[in-house]
Image: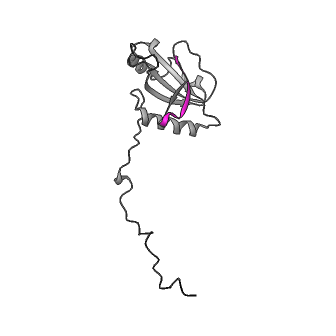
Amino acid sequence: MIRLGSLAGYPFEGPRVLGGWQAPAIGAVYVILYRADPEGKPHDFAVIDVDHADDLRDAKLPFGHPRSKCWERRAGTKWGVHIATYEVPGGTSAHREQIVKELLAVYKPGCAPEQYDQAWEDEWIGSYDAPNTTAPLTTNRDPNET
């Protein structure tokens, strides 16, 4: 098991070598990884792609996927490509998509066609002034009078 996401909140199964892996008939988020430093720690992986599928068999894994050549280039060989999967408990496609967007923003994987940024810019909604809601009451009424 490998934990991924902000605050490492998602328990993914794997990583496993993608070559020879049989995709199960489940809806899941999947992360493509490789060992960034093969001589380093055995559990140090770099995320190179993130996606999801309603049925993992439809994602054309292991190497029929449209981005598999990018994975192989990043890993140096197809045998260096790994996969980890997360079957979202009770999750729908929308739940999986949200997790994918979060993981893309956190890891910024090089083979992913879309990138998301968790930054916030003031000009996205403009600036505004809110009235001071913590000031004293502005009524003329004296609270001590009955």
Above or below, comparing residue 52 to residue 82 in the picture: below
Looking at the image, which residue is at 45% across and 20% down? 68
Across and down, in percent, residue 53 comes to 56, 30
Which residue is situated farthest in the bottom direction here? 146
In the image, is residue 17 part of the stretch drawn in magenta? yes
Above or below, comparing residue 146 to residue 21 in the picture: below
Q: Which residue is at the front of the view, 61 or 77?
A: 77
Colour mapping used in the image: one colour
Looking at the image, which residue is at 47% across and 85% down? 140
**The N terminus, quarter of image:** top right
Describe residue 30's horizontal placement relative to residue 104 as left or right: right
Across and down, in percent, residue 65 comes to 49, 21
Across and down, in percent, residue 128 comes to 37, 63
**The C terminus, quarter of image:** bottom right
Across and down, in percent, residue 55 comes to 61, 27
Q: Which residue is at the front of the view, 110 or 137?
A: 137
Looking at the image, which residue is at 50% across and 26% down? 31
Describe residue 74's horizontal placement relative to residue 13 as left or right: left
Describe residue 63's horizontal placement relative to residue 130 as left or right: right
In the image, is residue 39 part of the stretch drawn in magenta? no
Q: Give the total of numbered labels.
A: 0
Q: Main secondary structure of the magenta part?
A: strand
Q: Which residue is at the front of the view, 143 or 80?
A: 143
Q: Which residue is at the front of the view, 95 or 36?
A: 36
Which residue is situated farthest in the front direction here? 144
Looking at the image, which residue is at 42% across and 29% down? 112
Q: Quadrant of residue 60?
A: top right
Span of residues in magenta: 7-18
